[in-house]
Amino acid sequence: MLARLLIAASALVAPATAQDLLVTDTSTGLVMRFDGATGALLDPAAFDLTSLSQGAVTRPSEVLFAPNGELWVVDSGSDDLHRFAGDGSSYIGAVGLPAVNHIGGAT
């Protein structure tokens, strides 16, 4: 079965290059990174969100870099917003949003 992919946000900026595109794979918990100018796949597993979060993130549906440099991930499995270090090295924690199913999670 093909994984459902959602193009999310851009922000990995290297000198003299276009912004990269981050794409979540809701079936694996991975974030793939594509070249924003050419569409070429740069890294099929740029971030392994499920492993980094020790299972807290299971169905990432959107990902972006926040203004403070952190990687923010909306997870439709937990209906929460999760924070990661901007370089993808560590899980900071969940924000603890008060509503259920407000970000597209299953009922």
Image: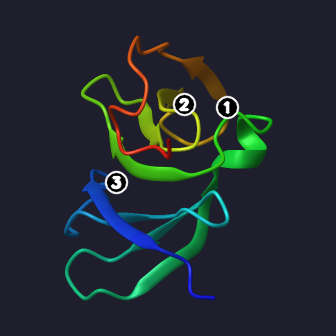
**Residue 29 percent location from the top left of the image:** 63, 57
Q: Which secondary structure lies at badge 1?
A: loop
Q: Is residue 67 left or right of residue 79?
A: left
Q: What residue did someone put label 3 on?
A: 12
> How many C-alpha atoms fall within 10 Å of the one at disc 2: few (<14), some, or many (≥20)?
some
The circle drawn on residue 90 is 1
Q: Earlier in the sequence, mark 3 or mark 1?
A: 3
Nearest the viewer among 70 and 105 is 105
Is the Cβ of the residue at disc 2 closer than 8 Å to that at disc 1?
yes
Residue 98 position (above or below residue 48): above
What residue is rendered at 40% in x and 33% in y?
101
Look at label 2 and name its amino acid.
Ala
> How many C-alpha atoms fall within 10 Å of the one at disc 3: few (<14), some, or many (≥20)?
some
Q: Earlier in the sequence, mark 2 or mark 1?
A: 2
Look at label 1 and name its amino acid.
Ser
Is the Cβ of the residue at disc 2 closer than 8 Å to that at disc 3?
no
